[in-house]
Amino acid sequence: MSDSRQIIKQNGKSFYWASKFLGKDYIDPIYSIYEMCRKLDDIVDEQSKEAAIKEIGLLKKDLTKKSLQKKFESLKRLDDDQFPQIKYFEEFILGQESDISFRQPKSINELLRYCYRVAGVVGLMVCDAVNIKDENLKFFAIDLGIAMQLVNIVRDIQEDALRGRVYIPENLIGSVSASDVLIKRDLITKVEQEKLRILDIADKYFNSANYAIKFLPKEVSMAFGLASNLYQGIGKKIIKKKQPFTNGRVYLNGAEKLFHTLKFVLKSKKNKNYQPIHNNMLHLPIKNSPSTNN
């Protein structure tokens, strides 16, 4: 098994499941992007703050295709016409820097900008890697990344708090410490209420992304459509189970993944004669960012 495949299998089980539906020519480019993103995440999450600042700073100082390929072996597998635009790496690194010097987001809009940087631009990188040139389709790729990251944030509230991070914005729960999120009963209750609001916002971005899935190349549309359905399914399970975040992660088991897969496959066979029109209101919080609809 390749390093990229092993990394995605260990760290992104739902996406790994969905990736089995990728066309063979698309697997390696997408896995290459994922491996690079995962390794950058690990620099931020696993190293000391000082070491992470130094390493990210050095990368940012010389952000070129050549330096990126030197740092991340997986990117050498991308052809010239598959290599993501440097402006997307710049945004991704801004997201990583915000995690290194973390502060609680002040608002939903600030949270959405963070989600754009750490996940929406990953969708844009993937578009470049699989030669999707349609700028309109890129809007929906951003939406899928944002939606998936919002689910990650709700799913990982406890895990993030143990790292000293609270992503639920101040305008929803107040300015709080990570330790208080884990132990104060009234605050836990408030977080439980507001995580549902965030999942509702995630659904708006999922629904936008799902609207355009069929217009992707057929070699990737099934995989991304299924990934969207699986992540949205995690959000729905969080709502249905009413399990406190202090009990740990909610995830889909094998039977549930199979159910969502069959449901999606059956639904995807229905023909819809329309062209996807993107709701630019979804991109107001990320206005003036690369490849957004504003």
Image (spheres, grey):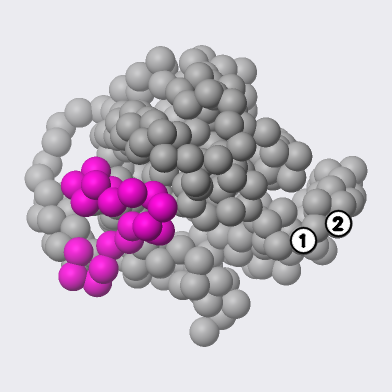
Res. 236 visible in picture: no
Along the horizontal axis of the image, is 76 left or right of 184?
right
Q: Residue at x 61, y 18 (%)?
A: 288
- What label sits on residue 51 in the rendered view? 2
Nearest the viewer among 110 and 146 is 110
Nearest the viewer among 268 and 162 is 162
Q: Residue at x 46, y 63 (%)?
A: 12
Quadrant for residue 186, please give it: top left
Along the horizontal axis of the image, is 241 left or right of 53?
left
Secondary structure type for disc 1 = loop
Q: Which residue is mark 1?
A: 47
Q: Is residue 36 one of those drawn in magenta? A: no
Kindly report the distance in space between the C-alpha atoms of the residues bearing marks 2 and 1: 6 Å
Q: Which residues are magenta?
A: 238-256
- What label sits on residue 157 in the rendered view? none
Along the horizontal axis of the image, is 294 left or right of 53?
left
Residue 176: percent from left, percent from top:
58, 31
Q: Is residue 255 one of those drawn in magenta? A: yes
Q: Amino acid at mark 2?
A: Ala
Residue 230: percent from left, percent from top:
29, 54
Nearest the viewer among 122 and 136 is 122
Secondary structure type for disc 2 = helix
